[in-house]
Image (cartoon, rainbow, N blue to C red):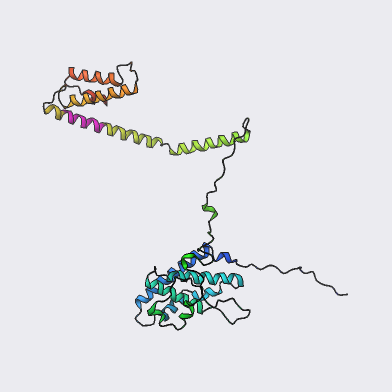
Amino acid sequence: MSRLAPAPSATRGELILQPNYFTSSVYVKALRDDISMLQLRYHEAFSQQTSDTPFALFKTVWLSQGWNWLHLKVFDHRTRQTFLDVTLRLFLERTVKTEAPFTRAVALFGLYLFFYTQIKDVTPPLYSIANIPIPFGISLLVPPITAKFSNISSISSSPAACHSDLGPMNPRDLPRELFVDEGSVAVAESPPQKRKGRPTKREKGKKAKRALEGLDEWLKRSPTPEEHTSDTRSLNDRLQEYQMAKVCMMNSLRSAGESAENGTLGSINRVVLERLREASELVGGTENSENVGVNRIEKAIEEMTKNPTSWGVLGLLGTRT
């Protein structure tokens, strides 16, 4: 009687990269940045070389940047098809007429090299494409460049269904899926409905905790005793500066022969009194004390007419020195 060792009924599943990864912003944005970096590196190398072999120089930059390993990114048939289509399409979008001639040339070099370095004749076989779908309206013809490549016609004559303005490519726009980091998204939570009846002990505790946290925040924003003392000193310094400036101004007016009733000081006091009366009428308030509002100003002006050394309104702020 033979005995069989226990074995799983099915093989373990394999992890396969899904096609939507290559149409998402994760791959599309990264590859666009890599293509821009490839153009920058080639421009630096091209500006420093003197030989008449631009494509050979491009292949050197291509290999130094590791682009020859890009074909080994995925092997699954369905996903590899999307990978090749999207990659060639991202090179193709840099060859439009709105781009600079140098950018179009580098994109054409990359498109040509990536297309003709596909992995073929291997076991098991890998998916490869025979031509590039190019919509009408996109021209790869850059005369000084295409004249050097005999195979460029096989790329530019690939079949296409519609004009590029009609969005014939699938997906229509890249990227199709946008990756959003969960940590950067503020999830809008619906406000909780207020429960009827008396609050529970838990709700009271939460309310007390929020009040305590708010008090802590207020204390943090409040000035410390040292800061309060500094602000008080600063206020006293400003008041002293004002008083000194006021004394200088009054001495200048008196030396110029200004009278308290008809001079500049009298005009200032009358203007202040009239404006204050207008404001009092608009507010409609009543003033019972003679030491506030209009009554206080009138008293100060009356004192100024009786005493030539009085300053009127200017004497109400601070003490006279």
**Magenta stretch containing residue 241, yes or no?**
yes
User: At x 37% / y 72%, what residue is drawn?
Assistant: 101
**Range of magenta residues:** 240-250
- Quadrant containing the N terminus is bottom right
Image vertical order of residue 29 relative to residue 114, above or below: above
Q: Position of residue 189 (x, y in %)?
A: 56, 44
Question: Dividing the picture into quarters, in which one does residue 278 lie?
Answer: top left
Question: In the image, residue 113 lies at what x, y percent?
Answer: 48, 78
Point 19% across, 29% down: residue: 247
User: From the viewer's perspective, is 123 left or right of 309?
Assistant: right
Observer-nearest residue: 272 or 131?
A: 131
User: Can see residue 41?
Assistant: no
- Any magenta on residue 19? no
Q: Residue 224 or 43: which is nearer the viewer?
A: 43
Q: Position of residue 117 (x, y in %)?
A: 51, 79
Q: Looking at the rendering, in which quadrant would you find the C terminus?
A: top left
Residue nearest the viewer, comparing 244 with 3: 3
Magenta part mainly helix, strand or loop? helix
